[in-house]
Amino acid sequence: MKYTFIAEEYKEQIARLGLDSVQRWIDLSGRLISTGRTTKLYRLNPPAGSLPTCCAKVYFYPQWDDRIRILCRGGLIGTSRAETEFRNLQTLHRRGLAPRVIACGHQRLWGLLYTSLLVTEEVRQAVSLDRFVADSLSALTQGQRRRFLTALAEFTRRMNAGRFVNGQYHWRNILVRAQDDQFIFQVIDPSSSRLRYRLMYPLYDLATLDVCAPYFFTRSERLAFFKSYQNTANRPLTRRQKKQLFKIAALREKIAKKEMKRYQFILPTNK
């Protein structure tokens, strides 16, 4: 495996553990967490004193048509999805918004991309937003719900700063940790490589975030979230903001059917 990045403080440990292939990483007490068409996510538990507990995301292309399909997206030329995600995570980590990257690398077969690996440090005591909403939201007081939404709005605004569009701002890609009656967020799997996302800045991320919101939050709470995101919590909506809300609602309807398939397990009723 060819590494494109290894965190400086872990180079010696990675060499000592002989982590020269994707399989050697998975062998670190790897437990499969989730799987997609071309990705698998593992939670790793390295030997004590070597590496921190971490998550390994593996991009794999088992069929030739998969490899040919991505020829211009890292398969032969260009930037692969793993490399794009790595760069975005590095940018967001420097701003305190994403976990630290431990390593990134890839393997090729006959010159074509075969597998890519992205290893990130685990965010301790954090759960995905969809799981938090399903398991813990109902136990929050009204004051805690307001603080939760305000914190999420501020986090999203900081993420979108500098015209950064996540493009994968799904609930399952947002980690939340409750600490001392406060809520701390981190984002995983950011992918801002597609031009169509950047052209809709930042409405796509807000629409994606809002798809499941009506099932769990009132209109007033969703409006308060939007105003907090705009940093205008104590002011009436402007004409421009009202137009933005209509655009977000229209975009939300376009992506809702596909997006809600991810969250059937948490949706209480049809809405």
Image: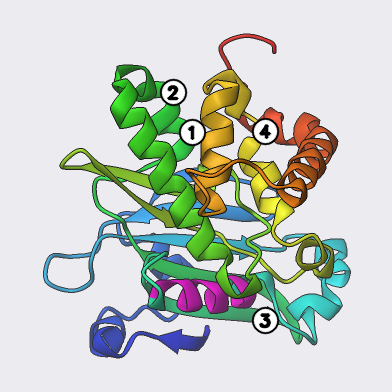
Q: Label 4 belongs to which residue?
A: 211
Whichever of labels 4 and 1 marks the residue nearer the N terminus, that label is 1
Viewer-closest of 103 and 130: 130
Q: CA distance from mark 3 to mark 2?
A: 40 Å
Q: CA distance from mark 2 to mark 1?
A: 6 Å
Report x, y in % for residue 27: 36, 61
Q: Pointer 4 and pointer 1: residues touching (CB < 8 Å)? A: no
Q: Residue at the spot x=40%, y=69% of the render?
A: 24
Tell me which amino acid carries mark 4: Val
Which of the numbered marks, if any, corresponds to residue 134?
Answer: 2
Q: Is residue 101 left or right of residue 86?
A: left
Check disc 4: other Cα within 10 Å, few if <14, some if 14-19, many if 20+: many
Q: CA distance from mark 4 to mark 2?
A: 15 Å
Whichever of labels 3 and 4 marks the residue nearer the N terminus, that label is 3
Does dot 3 land on a helix, a strand or a loop? Answer: strand
Residue 16 in the image: above or below residue 197:
below
Does dot 2 land on a helix, a strand or a loop? Answer: helix
Viewer-closest of 165 and 144: 144
Q: Label 3 belongs to which residue?
A: 108
Q: Pointer 2 and pointer 1: residues touching (CB < 8 Å)? A: yes
Part of the protein shown in magenta: 83-93
Q: Label 1 belongs to which residue?
A: 130
Q: CA distance from mark 1 to mark 3?
A: 35 Å
Q: Is residue 57 left or right of residue 135?
A: right
